[in-house]
Image: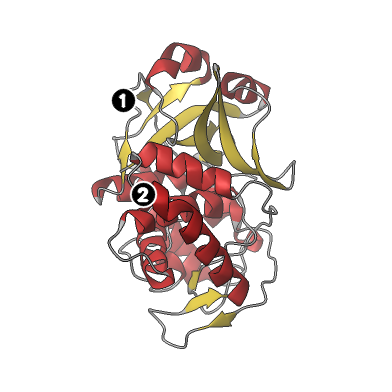
Amino acid sequence: MTGIAVCAALLTGLACKQTTGAEDRVYTTDEDRAIFERYLAEMEPKKALPMGQLVTESALFFLGVPYVASTLEKEPEGLVANLHEMDCATFTDNVIALARTIKGDNPSFESYCLNLRQLRYREGVVAGYLSRLHYTSDWVYVNDKRGIVRDVNKETGGIPLKLHLSFMSTHPDSYRQLKGNPSLIEEIAQKEKEISARTTYYFIPRDKIEACAGKMQPGDMVCFTTAVKGLDTSHVGFIYKDGGRLTFIHASSLQKKVTVESSSLEEYVRKGKNTTGIMLARPL
């Protein structure tokens, strides 16, 4: 797994049905609706929990769900509401969207889809491939502005992070929508420059994680920053405190399922050859 941008690189199929409208097109299955109903029954009694706890409970609900990459790659572009198989990015999207749905007055599959669309698309509207938030840093920036999450990296002890995004525009053959589409590649390149030009990014370097651990909260979205050229992050999950151990819950490509990481957060970062540290986003 190499970031939200690269979660989409290897294409997989998804048997699904879809609505017919462009902006409101939804790819989903009866299985996904059944999972949502089970989630609703289990989590609605817990809706009064603080958001971080509710996010943690929601993440644990999906333990064992299979890891499958690139379920978002549908043409034409539409909202993919897939709860039966996930990669790391769709796992975090789904968990936050579901927790927000439970917090609402009348939780339903339709309100879950609305919350998911708000998280995943730049204006909360499906308007083609470019409207999707492909890079984690951009996802955090946009959803912080909307009040869906809060960027807590600076206050947690982070230092400035300068981005030089270019992965998607320089690896177009890895993306069905970009391959053989020079005009779209140029538009992606312009968006990468726009995202990289911001001076608001902070991250917690790998050697500061232990010192900053006390300010991290269960349910915080944790994003692993990378030294891979052109990328911002390589993986995402949720902070989890297992007794006295600080770790995280994630959809693991290695374990092929949603799991609680066996390593501590610091150990995981230190083991990653290209992992430089972490970014945090606190669901609101």
Return the residue nearer the eye: 30 or 139: 30
- What is the residue that sits farthest to the front in this orientation? 45
Tag nearer the camera, 2 or 1: 2
Return the residue nearer the eye: 164 or 154: 154
Return the residue nearer the eye: 61 or 206: 61
Residue 148, percent from left and from top: 30, 49
Quarter of the image where the N terminus is located: top right
Please say if 61 is above or below 185: above
Quarter of the image where the C terminus is located: top left
Residue 255, percent from left and from top: 74, 42
- Regarding mark 2 in the picture, which secondary structure is present there? loop
- What is the residue that sits farthest to the right in this orientation? 255
- Locate residue 154: give its quadrant: top left
Which residue in the protein does label 1 denote?
154
Residue 168 is left or right of residue 163, and the answer is: right
Please say if 21 is above or below 104: below
Please say if 169 is above or below 219: below
Residue 120 circle label: none
